[in-house]
Amino acid sequence: MTALLRDLPREQRRSVILMTLAVALVGTAYGVTATANGFALWQILLLAVLVMAGSAELLFVGLIGAGANPWLTLGASLMLNLRTVVYGMAASPLLRGWARWPGAHIVNDETVALSAAGPTRPGSAPRLTTAQRRATFTAAGLGVAVGWPVGALIGATLGQIVGNPEVWGLDAVLPALLGAVAVPAIRGGSMVAVAVLAGAIALVAQPHVPLGLAPMLGLLAVAVVLLGRRGASGGGSDADSPAGVPAPGNSVGQVHSRETSGHSREGSGRPRETSGHSREGCGNVVAESGGVADGAGAAS
Amino acid sequence: MTAVLVAAAALAVGTYAMRRGGVALGGRVGEGPRAQAAERTLDHAVVALLIGVTLTAAVYDGGAPAGWARPLGVGCALVAAWLRAPLAISILLGAGVTALLRAIGLS
């Protein structure tokens, strides 16, 4: 615990506390929504603790409440959670040995975004060391593990009083939180390009693909932007990346990450495999929905 | 209701399996320039996913557009986050603007 606090930079401490409050707020929205959709308190809390994935839970209770088939609902929620595979890969260097088992459960949007985000003011300080990222990830995970069920409990209690969560704008709380943790994680031109392109792809694809899949299709943007950059810079993939240079204070983290990564070389192609796969999957979707984009834009 | 509970249990198990699987996959990436390239790719992928979920959740209810109030509210939250407002302020702004727009009759 003392190690956790020692390795947690001041600014990150503040972020984690604010994030915990924000997650509790989204949990409240989830509790209210689930209650409005006929879920019992014990079910709401059990889902909150065992699934601990805000967007998937909201989708799950929303669809069940709307009378959807439980198995289709399960499929949509799992598809929305597919992105946690990518998050798990991103968080992997922060989790060693036995910590991978409990640590995997707290891999989610907020923990991965905060532990990747580094300083919120670009250029003001070096990127976080691995030890600092690990502490941020753990603290953020504890925050989510506490804030989410507590918020759900408050929401389930309030749900009897509040009635329709939309009147209070509670349905906006989850996208607002995800957007607000995403924005500070966007560093540099290539990330801005990825964010814009991925957002556009997801928005265009959403009405045309099974529920939950559209954000995964946005990964196409990563392939397009990074491969485009590599082509433009003549193969120097990290030429424009200050992140590629280890920070001077990084030595502690370096030792740990070497320990976890003594494995195979052939495994290192995997992330690209992931995006390559989605590229195949969505080429036709984009083509197919391109013509409808104008109509969808006018309708929304 | 039994089917719903079984589906909920399967969601919990499936979600954990995907997270754990991702952690295991990521651990296979080695050191050196290839690992740095992989990390960079994953950093970009995280941003792509976050933005994708944010925008689809803001604009749609399932496959159908959700109206104007929520996208505009979430838009305010994003602008606030861009201006480095504290997280809670951004979120309260998002919910507040959405509720306000609905109160004045915008769906």
Image: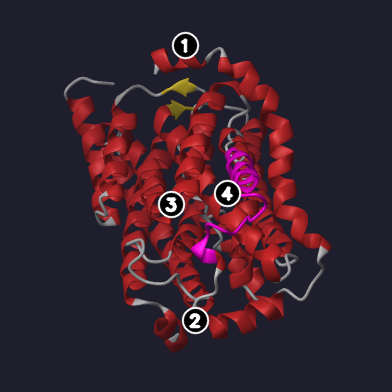
Q: Give the residues drawn in magenta, as a range.
A: A221-243
In the rendered image, which residue does mark 1 sit on? Answer: A295
Kindly report which numbered mark, 3 or 2, lies closer to the viewer in this rendering.
2
Give the quarter of the image for residue A160: top left
Viewer-proximal residue among A149 and B56: B56
**Residue B17 appears in the rendering:** yes
User: Label 1 sits on what residue type?
Assistant: Gly
In the rendered image, which residue does mark 2 sit on? Answer: A248
User: Label 4 sits on what residue type?
Assistant: Ala
User: Label 3 sits on what residue type?
Assistant: Ile
Residue at (49, 68) in percent of width and height: A137
Chain where mark 3 sits: A
Q: Is residue B66 left or right of residue B24?
A: left
Mark 4–mark 1 contact, CB under 8 Å? Answer: no
Q: Position of residue A131 (x, y in %)?
A: 51, 79
Q: Quadrant of the C terminus of chain B?
A: top left
> Taking A193 as reference, is B87 above or below it?
below
> Taking A138 as reference, is B76 above or below it?
above
Q: Is residue A259 left or right of residue A221?
A: right
Q: CA distance from mark 1 to mark 2?
A: 52 Å
Q: CA distance from mark 1 to mark 3?
A: 30 Å
Mark 1–mark 3 contact, CB under 8 Å? Answer: no
User: Label 2 sits on what residue type?
Assistant: Pro
Looking at marks 1 and 2 on the same chain, the residue that comes earlier in the sequence is marked by 2
